[in-house]
Image: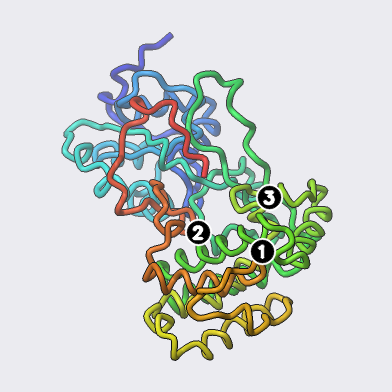
Amino acid sequence: MRDTRNAHQAPARSLPIPIRPWGGESLTSFVQRLAAANRTRDTILWKTIARPESSSLGSHLEFFEALLNPPAADRLAVISGLPLARLSVALPALGWARQHAPDLMEKKTPAVRFQAAMGYTRRACPHCAIRRNTAPPRLHLPITQIICTRHQHWQSVTISGSWAKATERPPSPQPVDLSPLAGMAAAQRRLAQILRCYGPDVLVMSVRDARSIAEKWAADRWAEPAMVQRWQTRARKLDWPAEAETITQNSEAGAIVSHPEVATLAAFLAPLTVAPTEFFYPENKDEIRALVDRTRAALGLTPLAAAACQWPCSAPRTSADAIWNHIDQVRVTRGRHRWRQQRSAMIPELGIPDPSHQTWQSAARHSRVRHDR
């Protein structure tokens, strides 16, 4: 077997068969597809591109993202046969090393660092992959693009992290066909409108607030029984278990069946996220109640009784006013919600790393850490 330990020191040469990268594709996914097209292993190709910090490379690379320093990025451009500018546009991880791995940028020799925490990706639509005659790649997608509107497929999250044995790794979830469900395309348009009107930060906060409210409804099935029954009906159309316990925001199934309601809630909560101080004063109670009534009407829910709209919520909170209680909690905490401050290396709603996350470590040090949410 040919020794590849110093392959990164040899002059780089283009591979015979080039491939086109997808927009937002993971670096490990692109190198894996490039290696498969040229009948070689991705581990050998990685050692040709740069010197990995981890001494052992295997199939677990599928669950990681790669960070390259400039010499390694230049070698990748030569080996792939594509200009570096084009690769930088299509492969977002090429621009992450400067901020999240400054020590790697200082190295003069080609180097690569594999990050488990950055492995949050989604499997692309299989029909789109067939049109391009390739295997479905793994993409960093924002929430506004998680549904392939052309083929009505939910592009599922791939399990990130690593396991000691290959048999311990759960199978990657397949994309879900959403053609039996209605309202998914409209939900994507609402989220895209939030992004256009308010920007990415408001989109992230609004979606997290909406999922927090939906989680309260899922936890207490008697709070909004009509809503839970609606989610169960969607689950049955997808041939999934329809028990209320399975419909949670912590699962991919729960995120799918509640996606239209989460998008509607996020659209109504976006003004609250932009100007939360407007909702801190008791004199705005009537405007707040009008907002809640419009939100519940858009969701197909009955209006709240006057007794359920105490301000502040000094009376015992009922289980049917999760939206009103959420607004009151915004007032009490001044917008510092525990579910907004997720301790995660990635921002899953945008598909990019969190700039405030400062615990970046190499995959070799945390080979058993899982970041599957």
Q: Position of residue 195 (x, y in %)?
A: 47, 72
Label 2 environment density (alpha carbons within 10 Å; few <14, some 14–19, many ≥20): some
* Mark 3 → mark 1, Cα distance in angstroms: 19 Å
Q: Residue at x 64, y 84 (%)?
A: 306
Q: Position of residue 93 (x, y in %)?
A: 37, 47
Q: In the drawing, what numbered circle is on residue 149?
A: 1
Question: Which of these two is toward me, 19 or 240?
Answer: 240
Kind of residue sitting beneath label 1: Thr
Kind of residue sitting beneath label 3: Ala
- The picture quadrant where one finds residue 165 is top right
* Mark 1 → mark 2, Cα distance in angstroms: 14 Å
Are discs 3 and 1 less than 8 Å apart at CB?
Answer: no
Question: Which of these two is toward me, 161 or 207?
Answer: 207
101 horizontally vs 353: left or right: left
Label 1 environment density (alpha carbons within 10 Å; few <14, some 14–19, many ≥20): some
Closer to the observer: label 1 or label 2? 2
**Residue to which mark 2 is pinned:** 142
Helix, strand or loop at label 2? It is loop
Q: Residue at x 33, y 26 (%)?
A: 365
Closer to the observer: label 3 or label 2? 3
Q: In the drawing, what numbered circle is on residue 253?
A: 3
- The picture quadrant where one finds residue 65 is top left
112 horizontally vs 312: left or right: left
